Image (cartoon, grey):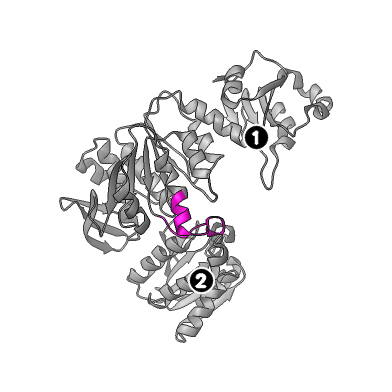
Amino acid sequence: MFTLSEILEATGGKFVYGREDITVSGVSSDSRSLNTKDLFIAIRGKNFDGHNFILDAINKGASIVVVDGSFRLDASCGKLCHKGHEKVAYVRVADTLKALGDIACFHRARFDIPVIAVSGSCGKTTTKDMIAQILSLQFNVLKNEGTFNNSIGLPHTLLKLNNDIDMAVVELGTSNFGEIKRLTQIARPNIGVITNVGPAHLEFFGSACAVLKEKYELINNLEAPSIAILNADDVLLKKKIKIEKDKSVFSFGLNNQCDFKASNIKIGKGKIDFILNERQLFRINVLGRHNIYNALAALACGMIFGIGPDKLRNRLSNFILSSMRINLKKIKDYQVIDDTYNSNPLSLECAIEVLANFNAQGRKVLVMGDMLELGEKSAFLHRKAGKKIIKSGINTLITVGRHSLETAEFVRKSRADLKVYSCGCALEAKGILSSLLRKDDLVLVKGSRALEMEKAIQGL
């Protein structure tokens, strides 16, 4: 519940029209899902403008409408009055997207609970889900669904906080400087987890060091007791671990000295066993050696909150990956590894390693879509992926998109025996797969979200 005065306090906005004795029971930025007595906040995006849906929101029973400085209320009064316009309170703010975050931050401050925030170049969704699953053994945990990790998704997650919630686990994403700091200011986390730092979104950041600077804003802005959980095997994070003095740091890894270390790793079909700190045996029923790092970060959180090894072991072994993330599927007489949610150089390298280490009776086929937002380093990084491919034991490569043509050409020149196909879209790749695949073949499909790589395997 928010009163009008609380909305004004949270946003620094100005009441400009309508009723003042009004409260709201929820906050919505989408008129389609708005409930009666909700606040509707009109956000402008690249492909939409919430101000165009104010009338819809009022018809659905919105009590407060938040608009930005460029919206002309007087020009809309005539057509809105007969639709209950006079029963609604209008608040004007400079930036409605910022106002959404401000309202969520105001609501977050109502609850004295731990908040764990997870960021990183890849693995953050899986790590967030693992942490939430482990902690839900003993606590009522709120987490952001899927990848609701941006300046719209995170506030809507935090607005679900209520007195029954013991703690929150949230994922923070970024593609531009300043986003992590802003999201951290909204969520006010006490514990920060960074999975890794890689060359993602280089179109905006320019270098991996710049990515590190952006991601590390999570740690810089932690609230007490300010606990950082960092990957000791990541070259850039390892340096931060050594010099960090202001935070309590717990490290995890496979290769370096750290607080949570996995050893004696045994990779089977769809499962991975490892020993934690040379004492406890754990199993994760997922593909990919890289998921050990995600599990270690989750185990660190579980132990920090006092959950014993036996409970952690059982809970972790029951973890199931989200859809489109290294999911092994049986389609007709062949197997498909669906990793179609997204792609960047680090996550692609991990996926290729999964394909290379998988014991398949038939051929190994990689369907690789473009990695986007890599800027001037795109061609170099796509060729670098080609180097990984030619050493992986893959028999066939199908590329999708113009950037991955760099990968295709590199592989053609380097490995004449490896079959290479280049496609313009995922549906074209599906056609090639349909005619190419035989019994016992194994296919890995991966690419950036915009390419909709899942279409390459739908209905095969």
Amino acid type of the residue that numbered disc 2 sits on in the rendered structure: Phe
Label count reads 2
In the rendered structure, which segment of residues is drawn in magenta?
197-213
State the image quarter where residue 449 is shown: bottom right
- From what the image shows, is residue 50 above or below residue 338? above
Query: Which residue carries the number 2 mark?
Result: 380
In this image, 272 relative to 195: left or right? left
Spot occupied by residue 269 in the image (x, y as percentages of width and height):
30, 63
Of 120 and 326, which appears nearest the observer? 120
Spot occupied by residue 264 in the image (x, y as percentages of width and height):
20, 60
Of 36 and 212, which appears nearest the observer? 212
Spot occupied by residue 72 in the image (x, y as percentages of width and height):
78, 31
- From what the image shows, is residue 259 above or below residue 137? below
Q: Look at the image and tell me whether residue 433 can be seen.
A: no
- From what the image shows, is residue 275 above or below residue 23? below
Q: Quick one: label 2, few (<14), some, or many (20+) residues within 10 Å?
A: few
**Residue placed at 25% from the left, 40% from the top?**
303
**Residue placed at 65% from the left, 36% from the top?**
32
- Label 1 element class: loop
Mark 2 or mark 1, earlier in chain: 1
Amino acid type of the residue that numbered disc 1 sits on in the rendered structure: Asp
Q: Quote the CA–CA distance across marks 2 and 1.
A: 38 Å
Of 86 and 34, which appears nearest the observer? 86
Give the label on residue 95, or none: 1
What quarter of the picture does the N terminus occupy?
Answer: top right
Question: Is 204 a magenta residue?
Answer: yes
